Image (cartoon, grey):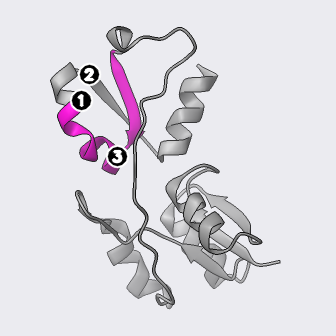
Amino acid sequence: MQHIAIQGEPGSNSHLVVRENHPDAQTVPCASFEEAFTRVTDGECELAVIPIDNSLAGRVADIHHLLPASGLHIVGEHFLRIRFSLLGLPGATLDGVRTVASHVHALGQCRRIIREHGWDTVVAGDTAGAAREVAEA
């Protein structure tokens, strides 16, 4: 079975890309992009699925620093259409929302609606992790 490293948790956008392109692979969640690269260079994983660019937020800066130093190279590409949903605990209402937690790029992509509602933001490691943290709260 092929092992593919991702930055983020199950349910993250990178995880969705693995499921779409390598449905039989084992996804290996990593806490950082650097860890995902290390899992491949150390031979623990055969591939890593890593975001390179965000059409609204621009380049994913860490990648353009880490990739050249890693000795790895890009072997494929996938364009993922992103659709965001506002999640809350059972019984929550839109009027009760005060804070939105998500990945920094997701917050940037949703900045207009966040600003319109006056919500505070909390940066999380990834979108799936933010959803998990809200559910656990």
Which element type, helix, strand or loop, lies under badge 2? loop
Which residue is under mark 1?
Answer: 114
Q: Position of residue 60 (x, y in %)?
A: 32, 65
Mark 3 or mark 2: name the one nearer the start of the chain.
3
Which residue is under mark 2?
Answer: 119
Which residue is under mark 3?
Answer: 106
Residue 40 as seen in the image, left or right of residue 123: right
Frontmost residue, 94 versus 136? 94
Q: Residue at horizontal 70%, vertical 64%?
A: 27
Q: Residue at horizontal 48%, vertical 11%?
A: 92
The image shows residue 4, relative to residue 134, as above or below, that is: below
Quarter of the rendering containing residue 56 = bottom left
Which element type, helix, strand or loop, lies under badge 1? helix
Question: Any mark on residue 71, and which?
Answer: none
Q: Residue at horizontal 22%, vertical 31%?
A: 113
Label 3, label 1: how far apart the Cα atoms are: 11 Å
Quarter of the rendering containing residue 108 = top left
- In magenta segment, residue 108: yes
Residues marked 2 and 1 touching at CB (< 8 Å): yes
Label 3, label 2: how far apart the Cα atoms are: 14 Å
